[in-house]
Image: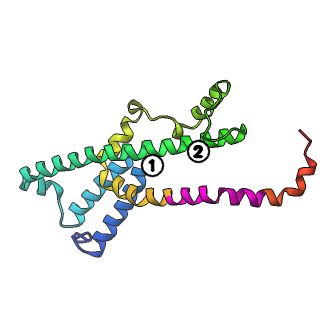
Amino acid sequence: MMTLFVLGSVGFWILTGLAALILFVMTEFEQPGWATGTLIVTFVALAVFGNFNLWQVVHGNPMGALLALLAYVGVGAVWSVGKWWFHVKECRSNYQDLRDAFMERNKLEKSADIPDDQKSSFQEVVSRHASAAKPLIRENKSRITIWMTYWPWSMTWTIINDPVKKTFRWVYHQLQAVYQAIADHSYKSVERDRPTP
C-alpha cells in the first residue's frame, strides 16, 4: 500500500490526472479553497502512499526550492497580466453583444451612437450583466490572485478554451441571419394574428 502512488506508476498518473482535472475546474470556477485542498491532499498522498515527499525535497535543496518558488511566482505574475487582458477582451465582447441587441431591439443602426434619451436605459441593461461591465481591478483581486497562484491550470485552460469559444462565437455571428430567417419563415403565417401597429 505504501507504493500505491510511486512516481511513474499507474496509480501516480491516475492521482495526478484526477488532481489536474479538479484544479482545472476549481480554477475556472474560482474556488481557491477547493484548489488548495486538492493540492494538499495530492502531496500528502504522494508522500504517504508514494515515494515523493515535497518537504524532503525542499529541505534537501532549500536554495533550489527558493529559486523554483520565485520563478513560479514570477510566471504567475506575468500570466495574470495576460489573463487580465483576455478577461477584459471577453467583457468588451459581451458589452458589444448587449449593445448590438439593444440597438436592434430599438430599431437603431448598430454602428450609430445611442441616442441621449436612451443611454440611461442601455446602462441599466449593462448593469444587469456583470460580464459586460468594464472590469475594475479593485473588484477582481481574488480572481487575479487565483490566476497567479494556479497559473499552470489557468494558462492551460485558457489556451485550450478561449480559441474554441471564439470560434463558436464567430460561427454564431455568421449564422445569426440564417437562424432568424428560419424562425421568420416558420412564423410567417402567424403575423396576421398580430395587431397592426
Amino acid at the residue labelled 2: Asp
Q: Image quadrant for the C terminus?
A: top right
Which structural element holds mark 1? loop
Q: What residue is at 84 percent from the left and 56 percent from the top?
A: 187
Which residue in the protein does label 1 denote?
29
Q: Position of residue 88 (x, y in %)?
A: 43, 41
In the image, residue 51 lies in the stretch drawn in magenta: no
Residue matched to label 2: 97
Q: How dense is the environment of label 2, judged by Cα within 10 Å: few (below 14), some, or many (20 and up)?
A: some
Where is residue 185? Give x, y as percent.
Answer: 81, 60
Q: Where residue 11 is drawn, which disc sits there?
A: none
Amino acid type at mark 1: Phe
In this rendered view, identify the residue nearer to me: 20 or 181.
181
Q: Is tag 2's residue or tag 1's residue first in the polypeptide sequence?
A: 1
In space, the residues marked 2 and 1 are separated at their CA atoms by 23 Å
- Above or below residue 17? Residue 28 is above
- Tell me what residue is drawn at x 12 percent, y 57 percent: 57
- Left or right, 40 with respect to 179, comes to left
The answer to whether 13 is drawn above or below residue 109 in the figure is below
**Residue at screen point 53% across, 39% down:** 132
Residue range (magenta): 167-183
Q: Is residue 182 magenta?
A: yes
Relative to the observer, which residue lies in front, 61 or 133? 133
Q: Residue at x 38, y 49 (%)?
A: 34
